[in-house]
Structures are given as structure tokens and as C-alpha cells.
Amino acid sequence: MFRRTLLLLAAGLVTVPAFAQTPEAPAPGQPRPMLSRILDGDLPQLDIPGTFKILLRPHFGDLVRRDYMRTEAGLRWALNKNFDISGEGSVYFNHGLGDTDEGYGIGRVRVGSRYLLDEWPRAGYDTSLTLTMDAPVGDPPVDMTDGQYHLTPSFIVQRPSIRHPKFTAFAGLGLDLIDPSDIPGQFGTNQPHEDSMNGTIGAIYDLGQLKYIVSATYATTAVLGHHAEHFVYLQPSVQWYVPRKFTFKSKTQWIVGLGVRTSWGPDGTDFSVRNRVRAEITFRQLMRNIRDLNKPKEPAAP
């Protein structure tokens, strides 16, 4: 009960203060960050202040692996140059190619916020503080969620290389505090079943439209859990930001990713190939127009 109360309070802290912030106008010549969400965690790079995005991530692999299909749909809003908030829901529906009927609905929700510390802990470094809450909802298929509430505070530090500008290294620490829900689910292979802490190191090689990423994570329940278990994950991947000419000059940014995930833990060694498609629909200009309409008009000069 205490943990569930903490999760609800965290959700309130994530969302309520956000609307007290006022988006700031972007500085002249400010570049648009490309690595806003390149990993499952958040690197310390935010969109231009005022940017409002709709995010879609369909799981096309479900057409052959499951009797239903999942699509992540969410929103991300950069309120100012240091702070953004996000919300996401995992929608599922029967795709008609399987043998069972799982129905349709929303099976999982996620809310989060991120605060960016520029030039910290020293010049050349950037740090982001992130707090997210993940919860199963409704009556989803058993294998869609793990049936747990998750509260995950974390921080991550990145530093671009001075000698090699295309190369960026990053490292971070985080917690995964879980609490059972009333919704049945299944844990994934080599996934902690108790509260755990984790550390991640990695690097990004940025070639513009192509970005190569490799990360290694160590997680353990030894400190926070009742049983000491240890997990290691290695994840090399590549992401392709699809050029506009292949999307009929659409303003929607399509991102295609392909990665390999290897894990070692109590369930043994697991190897899997993962693909990801994400669409980012940006409404920065729309948000700017709304703010301009709400500004008080200056009196005309006599």
C-alpha cells in the first residue's frame, strides 16, 4: 500500500508542476536535438522549448509473434530548455491473423518528466534527472505486461568527444522500484522480480541520419531486494532517421531501429533481435502560435 501511494504521489509530482512552467523562445540558431530518446532511458538532450510531439511506435513484429498487435502512443512536451514531460499508453487490438481473440484496449500507461542540468558536473558534460512511473491498466493479455507498478528514478551523464565530435559517451545510475498490481502478467527473461538498482555505460557514433549505439547494463537486487540476483545486458543497435524524400516530404520524423539484446542472469543466457519503428509528429509552430494569441496586445502608438 505504501508503494502504491508513493507511485500516485510521484505521478502527481511529474504532471502538476509542469504546467506552472512557461515555454521559452528558442535562441537564434539553436540546433534541434536529434537524440531526444535514442535509448529506453533518456539522454540529456531536449527538444527546442515549446516543442509538442505526438509519438507513435507500432510493434509490427506482433503480426507474427502474437495474436494481437501493440502500438505505443504518447505525447512529449518541452516546456522550457531544461524541463519536459511525457505520457504514453500501450494500445492493443486483435490483428486477425492469430487463433485467439484478445480484444482491444489500453494495457499499460507511463508518465514521466526529465530535467536537464547543462554543463554539470563540469564544463563539457550534461546530466539529466528522470522520473517515470509505469503501470498496467485494464484487462490486457497476460504476456503484455509483468503485472507490476514501476517507479524508476534515474540520472544519466553524457560527454561528447572533443577530438571526435561524432562520438558521445554516456553513463548513468537508476532504481527500479516495483509493487504488484491486481492485473496478472508475466516477467520477461532475466528481468528482476524485486526492487533493483542498475548502472549503464555506452557510446553513440552519430553519422547524421544513421546513429550507432552500444550500451552495457548491470542490475542487481542485492541491496534493495530480499534475494541477491545479478543481471547483465549488452545492447548494440543502429537507428536510421528516415530522410524526408522517402516520406513524401512529410513533417513527421520516422525512425527505424534494429538491435541485438543479449542478457545473462538467473534464467540463463538469452539472445534476441529487436526492431523498432517510431513516428514523431512535431507541433512546435502550432504551440508558438497559441502562445502568441494569448499574449496581451500592446496599445497602438499615438
Image: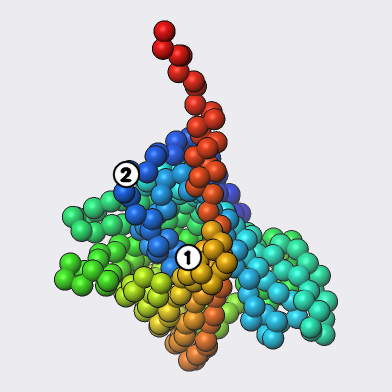
Query: As drawn, is 99 to the left or to the right of 282?
Result: right
At 49% from the left and 20% from the top, the residue drawn is: 297
User: Marks 2/1: CA distance?
Assistant: 39 Å
Residue 289's place in the image compared with 227, above or below, is above
At 46% from the left edge and 75% from the top edge, which residue is drawn?
A: 240
Residue 292 pos. (x, y %):
50, 32
- For numbered disc 2, what is the local secondary structure? loop
Q: Which residue is mark 2?
A: 28
Labelled disc at residue 176: 1
The image quarter containing residue 93 is bottom right
**Label 2 with label 1: CB-CB less than 8 Å:** no
Residue drawn 49% across the image and 77% down it: 257
Question: At which x and y percent is residue 280?
Answer: 54, 61
The percent position of residue 225, horizontal first and vertical second, equals: 47, 70
Tell me: residue 211, above or below residue 97. above
Query: Label 1 amino acid?
Result: Asp
Question: Where residue 56 sits: x, y (%)?
Answer: 60, 63
Residue 288 shows in the view: yes
Dot 1 alpha-carbon crowd within 10 angstroms: few under 14, some 14 to 19, many 20 or more: many
Q: Is the residue 291 above or below the residue 77 in the image?
A: above
Quarter of the figure with the N terminus: bottom right
Dot 2 amino acid type: Pro
